[in-house]
Image (cartoon, helix red, strand yellow):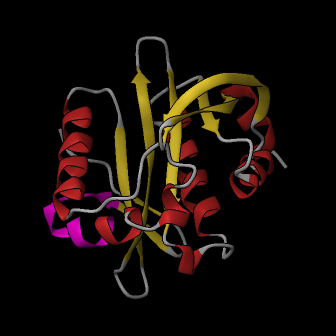
Amino acid sequence: MTFPILETKRLKLIELTHQHMNAVYEILSLDEVTRFYGTSPFTLQAEATRLIDMYHKHYLDKRGIRWGIKLRENQRIIGTVGLNVLNLKNKRAEIGYELHPALWRQGFAAEAVSEVIRFSFEQLGLYRIGAIVYPENIASLSLLDKLGFRHEGLLRGYMFQEEQFHDTFMLSLLKPEWEKSQEK
């Protein structure tokens, strides 16, 4: 089973391997990145290795797919994007992503997420892509709104992070909605 490599104008979405451990660790050890991620900041590089191993296992088990986001101009890994809780039988998944803060607000997340959405609907045959977002994560909510996701509701006490429960919003995008947005 060959891992799908995706390309956009400025990015290449690649399979993460142990050679990317330092970049993954650097990003996920930052408080501002993990604040809305559902986990505490990494403190050991072994955590990044375990995460990469988990992504690989989920891909092999067809339960998820996670790409490293690489800048085409310098081959630097700047984040990850992918599908969690992938359910091919029911044609649905949840999207997740994170970027190094030095590259926030430059359109990289939108570019990567848009390509994963396209791949999900056109190649994987998904019908629904969900997203779980902390209400305080204004940037992510804005990005998903821009990409056509609809708010479905508030999931009370849905995430447990830093010894407390957090509410999250559930958003989704359905294939017919995405197709209609591509006609414009």
Q: Position of residue 112 (x, y in %)?
A: 54, 59
The answer, for residue 181, to whether it is visible in the render is yes
Q: Is residue 52 left or right of residue 168?
A: left
Which quadrant of the view contains residue 21?
Answer: bottom left
The answer, for residue 69, to whether it is visible in the render is no
- Residue sitting at x 41%, y 12%: 89
- Residue sitting at x 66%, y 76%: 106
- Residue sitting at x 22%, y 26%: 61
Q: Quadrant of the N terminus?
A: top left
Q: Position of residue 173 (x, y in %)?
A: 69, 32
* Residue most extreme to the top: 89
Q: Position of residue 102 (x, y in %)?
A: 55, 81
Q: Position of residue 59 (x, y in %)?
A: 26, 36
Q: Nearer the viewer, residue 126 or 145?
A: 145
Tell me which secondary structure the magenta stretch mostly adopts: helix
- Residue sitting at x 55%, y 55%: 35
Q: Is residue 97 left or right of residue 177?
A: left
Q: Which residues are magenta?
A: 14-24
